[in-house]
Amino acid sequence: MSHARPDTSASQIEQAAALLAQGRLVAIPTETVYGLAGDARNPDAVRAIFALKGRPADHPLIVHIGTVAEIAAWAARVPPAAMELASAFWPGPLTLVLPAAPDVPRVVTGGLDTVALRMPAHPLALALLRRLGRGLAAPSANRYGRVSPTCARHVREEFGEGVAMVVDGGACTIGIESTIVDLSAGTARILRPGAITPEQIERCLHAAVERQPAPGTRSPGLKASHYCPRARVVCTAPDQAAATAAHWLARGHRVCVLSPAACDQMHAGLVWLRVSDDASTLARQLYAKLRQADDLQADVIVAALPAAAGIGAAVRDRLRRAAGGGEEFRA
Ligand code: TXA
Ligand code: MG
């Protein structure tokens, strides 16, 4: 594996492009999380992504593109709303689900007749995509169901030698995965919340947006249990964090508290991992803090939920899924 040498960006991009053209897998930085990228038109490369992640074959991948013009190569139909959203938010943390063109390898779409497209804003990802002129299938670069990586070191910890190269673009500036909007069925519908909020999408489209996936929607990242550290995650209101921690401590567990408010750390089994009370900063810190709690051998992570405004709604979504979809614990 190529470790982060004092490479220039240009030489990292050349090396990554050469590996991807050979059908190899390369981890790439994006503004949301690191992606495990392979040539989206190469079914063997795409199969290798599923194999390395341990991801079920019916869980579709997002195709990353470097220009708006490339939408036409992937989508059978491009509704006006897609162009409006792409113009407003690309490059950026927004994924559009559109009807797939007939020649899109169905291994990428998990057998669906729709394809998810995103133009990432990270300068290295964008330069690589434009250099290649090809779409890159790139799920988050973590093992199936686990916490997404937000720096190059996290990716190496996940996959070691399993990935040909990790392009090191520093820490991700957003820190949680893109907002996914489904435009394949007439109305716009949010499948996964992210940094781009429903209100921003509605302002752009001058139309109402469905806030929840339709019942029975195939978008497997919406599974109740996802983004899971090893430790059990328990979500609480911020003012309940200390009481909730006490509950688990009393049962003999090692507890990490993720909260902006200080926690009494006199108890040997308790570590307070301070997080920001600003939701955007919290989003940026979240996955590294979950990994840190695992490194500290916590049994239980007590996580204070931020307010639901702005990106806070997406942070709450990730924490609830990390908790396995369970309800808030009340001490
Ligand atoms: O921010 C992101 O979106 C990151 C970076 C690397 O771009 N990628 C990411 O990929 O989060 P992944 O594979 O971890 O999550 C992709 C999500 C899954 O929930 C999947 O079900 C959904 O996108 N998805 C992909 N194609 C879809 C489709 N055709 N219809 C519905 N959902 C789809
Ligand atoms: Mg993922």
Image (spheres, helix red, strand yellow):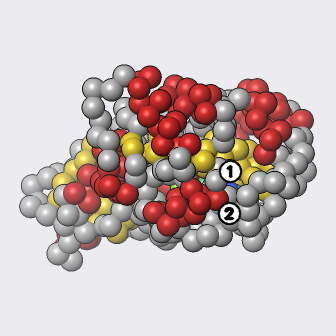
Q: How many marks?
A: 2
Q: Identify the residue shown where x is 43% and y is 56%.
A: 142
Look at the numbered disc 1 and give the secondary structure of its residue: loop
Decide which of tag 2 and tag 1 comes sooner along the chain.
1
On residue 327, which mark appears?
Answer: none
Question: At x 36% / y 22%, what residue is drawn?
Answer: 8
**Which residue is under mark 1?**
41
- Residue, far bottom: 251
Please tell me whether residue 58 is drawn above or below residue 23 in the rendered image: below
* Crowd rating for badge 2 (residues with CA inside 10 Å; few <14, some 14–19, many 20+): many
Dividing the picture into quarters, in which one does residue 257 lie?
bottom left
Q: Secondary structure at mark 2?
A: loop
What residue lies at 81% left-to-right and 61% top-to-bottom? 113
Q: Which mark is residue 107?
A: 2
Quarter placement of the C terminus: bottom left
Amino acid carrying mark 1 in the image: Arg
Q: Residue at x 29, y 40 (%)?
A: 3
User: Position of 106 compared to 99: left or right?
Assistant: left
The answer, for residue 256, to whether it is visible in the render is no
Left or right, 177 with reference to 200: left
Q: Amino acid at mark 2?
A: Val
